[in-house]
Image (cartoon, grey):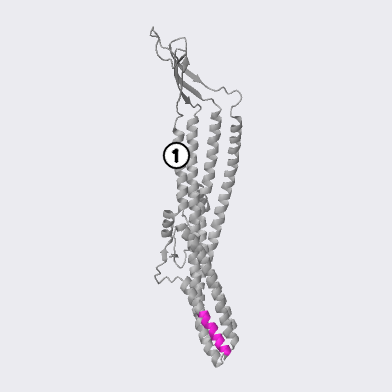
């Protein structure tokens, strides 16, 4: 009698724990929860683009680089030089005229303008424009990486929610079975070990539910940060139960060509090489001396009372002809050429690898496998009833139960793998070629 009460108490505790977990973590799509934000991926993506602060910071970096282009267009300011006497002939600031009407004291004024030679100004503008392009591709790279994280978190939550629904259905089945077994145990129709085995399944399932709920919370925390959602909110993905598994209508070469045009890492390497080449040309131009010219006026300090002249000055490139900087940038160009070649090879290999993984995922999601899952699901619905009717043994029931759990979890994982494989290809090629 004591053992019966103990078993009944354990069953009640298990059911209470299940109900608590169900209230906290299960997201029933047919109900409307005030703190639940239901989003399809396009809505989540728009919310991410509108609210993400890291993207805003990168956008400011582009504006900063664009301002430097404007600065590179500016000419150097002219320089005004002036000189006049302060003390002369026991008098201060002698700038008047003598008795004969001749001016007294010296006044010197000169305006100088630096004129850059060898096209330095244009080359500096080219560097600034390339720097803007680099900033834009860096922004796209940040956007691409954040979007990939958003995509993964979004569909991972969908997969984990599928697991939660599976655990919920299994818990309801086991709870009904446990209630039926309790009556059978009291009448002596089953052994206590069979009753305890079902309770052990419930305890194990509760642990799986807890671990799954913890994974959901981790993914929710990251996606809420990306969407700038605060408070007691839950992001509920709205996705289809299955994913299209048609073979892509593009070739490897089409994917590689697209990647060379739109892949952010590769394009940054291309523009980095262009930047280094432009810097090399600029350093060669800096070896040519710049010219400073300007008019000047001198009163009472030359052979003419009021002297007007033109000054021209330029450095003589005898020792410093910018040799070190020219040599350094030349090697930087060669280094970047090697880096671009390596990036080209890596991009092709990555695209081919992602494409092969996509084909594997499509193969595992074939129509044949889909029919198998449906038939296996129908079989599982009859397992509990078959065990209650004593048509199968406890050992067979446990095998069927564990196999079904494993098959359903693998099915949900395959759906996620197919989605992630499509996104990996699109991420590498820079555009959504795979639907």
Secondary structure category for the residue under label 1: helix
Who is closer to the viewer here, 39 or 13?
Answer: 13
- The residue carrying pointer 1 sits among few (fewer than 14), some (14 to 19) or many (20 or more) residues within 10 Å by Cα, namely few
Q: Residue at x 46, y 51 (%)?
A: 55
333 versus 23 height, above or below: above
User: Is residue 178 something one can see in this rendering?
Assistant: yes
Give the labeled residue for mark 1: 67
Please identify the quadrant where the N terminus is shown. Answer: bottom right
| Numbered range of the magenta stretch | 2-15
- Residue 33 at x, y percent in the picture: 40, 69
- Residue 317 at x, y percent in the picture: 58, 23
Q: Residue at x 49, y 55 (%)?
A: 146
Magenta-colored segment: predominant secondary structure: helix
**4 drawn magenta:** yes
Q: How many marks?
A: 1
Who is closer to the viewer here, 313 or 434?
Answer: 313
User: Is residue 366 something one can see in this rendering?
Assistant: no
């Amino acid at each position: 009698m004591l053992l019966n009460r103990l078993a009944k108490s354990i069953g009640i505790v298990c059911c209470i724990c299940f109900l608590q977990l169900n209230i906290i973590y299960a997201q029933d799509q047919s109900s409307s929860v005030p703190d639940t934000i239901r989003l399809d991926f396009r809505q989540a993506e728009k919310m991410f683009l509108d609210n993400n602060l890291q993207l805003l910071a990168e956008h400011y970096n582009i504006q900063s680089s664009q301002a430097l282009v404007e600065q590179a267009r500016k000419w150097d300011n002219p320089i005004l030089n002036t000189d006049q006497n302060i003390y002369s002939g026991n008098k201060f600031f002698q700038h008047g005229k003598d008795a004969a009407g001749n001016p007294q004291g010296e006044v010197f004024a000169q305006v100088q303008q630096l004129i850059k030679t060898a096209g330095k100004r244009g080359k500096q503008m080219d560097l600034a424009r390339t720097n803007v392009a680099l900033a834009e591709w860096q922004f796209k790279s940040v956007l691409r990486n954040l979007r990939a994280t958003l995509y993964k978190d979004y569909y991972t939550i969908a997969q984990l929610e599928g697991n939660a629904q599976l655990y919920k259905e299994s818990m309801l089945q086991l709870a009904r079975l446990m209630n039926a077994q309790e009556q059978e145990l009291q009448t002596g129709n089953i052994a206590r070990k069979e009753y305890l085995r079902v309770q052990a399944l419930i305890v194990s399932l509760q642990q799986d539910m807890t671990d799954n709920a913890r994974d959901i919370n981790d993914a929710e925390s990251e996606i809420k940060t990306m969407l700038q959602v605060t408070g007691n909110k839950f992001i509920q993905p709205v996705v289809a139960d299955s994913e299209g598994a048609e073979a892509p209508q593009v070739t490897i070469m089409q994917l590689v060509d697209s990647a060379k045009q739109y892949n952010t890492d590769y394009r940054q390497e291309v523009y980095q090489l262009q930047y280094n080449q432009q810097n090399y040309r600029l350093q060669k131009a800096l070896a040519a001396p710049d010219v400073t010219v300007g008019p000047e006026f001198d009163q009472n300090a030359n052979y003419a009372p009021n002297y007007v002249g033109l000054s021209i000055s330029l450095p003589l490139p005898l020792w410093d002809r910018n040799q070190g900087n020219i040599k350094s940038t030349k090697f930087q160009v060669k280094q970047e050429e090697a880096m671009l070649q390596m990036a080209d090879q890596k991009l092709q290999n990555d695209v081919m690898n992602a494409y092969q993984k996509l084909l594997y995922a499509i193969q595992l999601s074939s129509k044949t496998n889909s029919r198998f899952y449906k038939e296996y699901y129908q079989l599982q619905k009859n397992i509990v009833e078959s065990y209650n009717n004593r048509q199968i043994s406890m050992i067979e029931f446990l095998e069927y139960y564990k196999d079904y759990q494993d098959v359903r979890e693998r099915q949900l994982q395959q759906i996620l793998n197919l989605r992630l494989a499509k996104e990996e290809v699109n991420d590498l090629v820079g555009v959504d070629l795979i639907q």
